[in-house]
Amino acid sequence: MTVNLLDFNAKKLTEFCVDIGEEPFRAKQLLRWIHQSGEDSFAGMSNLTKRFREKLNAIAIIKPPKITSEYISSDGTRKWLLPVGAGNGIETVFIPEPNRGTLCISSQVGCALECTFCSTGRQGFNRNLTAGEIIGQLWWVNRILRNSKEENTAKTKHVNEPRVAELTGRKHDVSNVVMMGMGEPLANFENVVTALDLMLDDNAYGLSRRRVTVSTSGLVPAIDRLRDRCPVALAVSLHAPNDKLRDELVPINKKYPIKELLAACQRYLESAPRDFITFEYIMLAGINDSVTHARTLVKLVQGIPCKINLIPFNPFPSSGYERSSYEATYRFRDILMYADLVTTVRKTRGDDIAAACGQLAGSVLDKTNRKKHVNMGAAR
Ligand code: SAH
Ligand code: SF4
């Protein structure tokens, strides 16, 4: 059976090398070739013995997902579509800023959790991404960004890349990763954690734990597992200050209500690389954006070291919601800030190419796994 080495973190790659009779240190060399040099063939791996390369050729491949299209927003945000079989597609988004380059990665084909304001949730669920498909997004984007930096007009082998506007002064490599693309990362725990291992590994991408963020709608047992297994920065999609409203907007709240979620956040902070949790709060006109909601939120998060990130709702066809007005958003923010809560309003990036939060729909044609997955998620 052929194995895809992109599916392996350092531990699994070491086991693999030992299993086929090689020294454990070979895993380190392989990691560097695959993830730092962006190699997808064994032929060029000059410090590996010929015999080892032949062995690899016979039993292993380095197979990233395919990339078919790229979109570039007027604000420099770039989005790629990656087909993942059976007519399904996922999306990954790079957001260049003056002092950082953030990659927003998908973890599932669609999402089973059905938050009412989310285009991915509305699309339904098909399947979990493999570890290779998750880390493959970073693998690709690193390679593409390297090419566009080297020659601005680069046409890579795989991507029909339009001429990239020179974005003077913007970061052109990935310094931060947020698991905020399609899907609920903690519902695909093992594969996401394997990919996180590679993001943090000095022989692979070497990102700091503080610069890798998992965003979750609140799968409480999985938050605890993440704390024990691979603590990275945590963002929690709160979106409502009481259970009644949260039950409606984020249905998983019926299983893991706010009190349990906040207790898990407190536990997470014991091992977290940052000393705060980020609470995401989508601003929906007339739904969760009143003065009373803001005051209730202040009381709710009292005693939890946190930052609040207000996310202007990004509309999509027939969502049934509207974005809160500028006035309502800043009134809400001011109430939180007056209570000494660090609060930011997220800048909307890439909305002209449907790359903004919650607009990632990819394409999910086969949704037959949805029910099964919802049950699985609930059992965790
Ligand atoms: N499933 C995870 C991560 C992916 S969604 C989660 O829910 O946290 C990333 C963020 O985008 C979440 O905070 C999510 O609530 C938010 N989001 C979803 N739909 C949105 C929309 N239409 N407009 C703005 N933000 C949205
Ligand atoms: Fe899934 Fe997150 Fe969208 Fe909710 S907001 S449906 S958890 S991707």
Image (cartoon, rainbow, N blue to C red):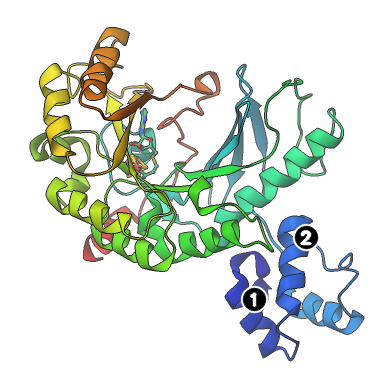
Give the secondary structure at mark 1: helix
Quadrant of the image containing the N terminus: bottom right
Q: Quadrant of residue 290?
A: top left
Q: CA distance from mark 2 to mark 1?
A: 16 Å
Relative vertical location of residue 105 with respect to residue 96 in this rendering, above or below = below
Residue 88 shows up from this direction:
no
Q: Give the side of residue 354 with respect to residue 250, left or right.
A: right
> At label 2, which amino acid type do we have?
Asp
Q: Nearer the viewer, residue 232 or 69?
A: 232
Residue at (67, 49) in percent of width and height: 66
Sequence-earlier tag: 2 or 1: 1
Residue 13, disc: 1
Left or right, residue 48 beside residue 67: right
Q: Residues within 10 Å of mark 2 (few under 14, many from 20)?
A: some
The answer to which image quadrant residue 115 occupies is top left
Residue type at mark 1? Leu
Q: What residue do we see at 54% from left, 60% from top?
A: 195
Please tell me whether mark 2 or mark 1 is closer to you in this view: 1
Assess disc 1: are there few (<14), some (14-19) or many (≥20) residues with their C-alpha within 10 Å of its C-alpha.
many
Q: Position of residue 302 (x, y in %)?
A: 17, 39
